[in-house]
Amino acid sequence: MNLLDIYTAAHNTQFQNRCRVAAWIAAQDIAAEDPGTPNHETRMDWSKRALQDNITIKPHQLAMQVLRNPVIAADPAGAADGDIQFQVNSVIDAIIAIG
């Protein structure tokens, strides 16, 4: 997949929505995590905002974080939900840093 294809995928509303649901699930997991988790306070703050649908990361920015995974980038429309969730979980700290 070339760069333009990745850009186009990141702006695809259906793909963005799948990424948003994966981020929401990650936010739920963070809300239930051990308070001893590194960076817990920042993660909890983001989690609360995410669950209230009040985060600043834009849908295409979130999708771009998911598209960092080359398997997903090769076929965004065909990517398994579990792969998208795995990628969100893998880059959650970068997502939190963005907003």
Image (cartoon, rainbow, N blue to C red):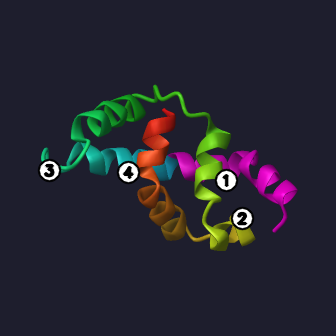
Along the polypeptide, which appears first: circle 3 or circle 4? 4
Q: Quadrant of the N terminus?
A: bottom right
Q: CA distance from mark 4 to mark 2?
A: 21 Å
Q: Residues within 10 Å of mark 1 (few under 14, many from 20)?
A: many
Residue located beneath label 3 in the image: 34
Q: Which residues are magenta?
A: 1-20
Q: Residues within 10 Å of mark 2 (few under 14, many from 20)?
A: few
What residue do we see at 46% from left, 65% from top?
Answer: 86
**Mark 1: amino acid:** Phe
**Mark 4: amino acid:** Ala
Residue located beneath label 4 in the image: 26
Residue located beneath label 1 in the image: 15
Q: CA distance from mark 1 to mark 2?
A: 7 Å
Element assignment for label 2: helix
Q: Nearer the observer, disc 3 or disc 2?
A: 3
Q: 59 left or right of 8?
A: left
Does 36 lie within the magenta span? no
Residue located beneath label 2 in the image: 77
Q: Are marks 3 and 4 in contact (CB under 8 Å)?
A: no
Q: Nearer the observer, disc 3 or disc 4?
A: 3
The front one of 8 and 17 is 8
**Mark 3: amino acid:** Asp
Q: Are marks 1 and 3 in contact (CB under 8 Å)?
A: no
Image spot of residue 25 (x, y percent)? 39, 51
Q: Are marks 1 and 2 in contact (CB under 8 Å)?
A: yes
Element assignment for label 3: loop
Q: Nearer the observer, disc 1 or disc 3?
A: 3
Q: 2 left or right of 16?
A: right
What residue do we see at 26% from left, 42% from top?
Answer: 39
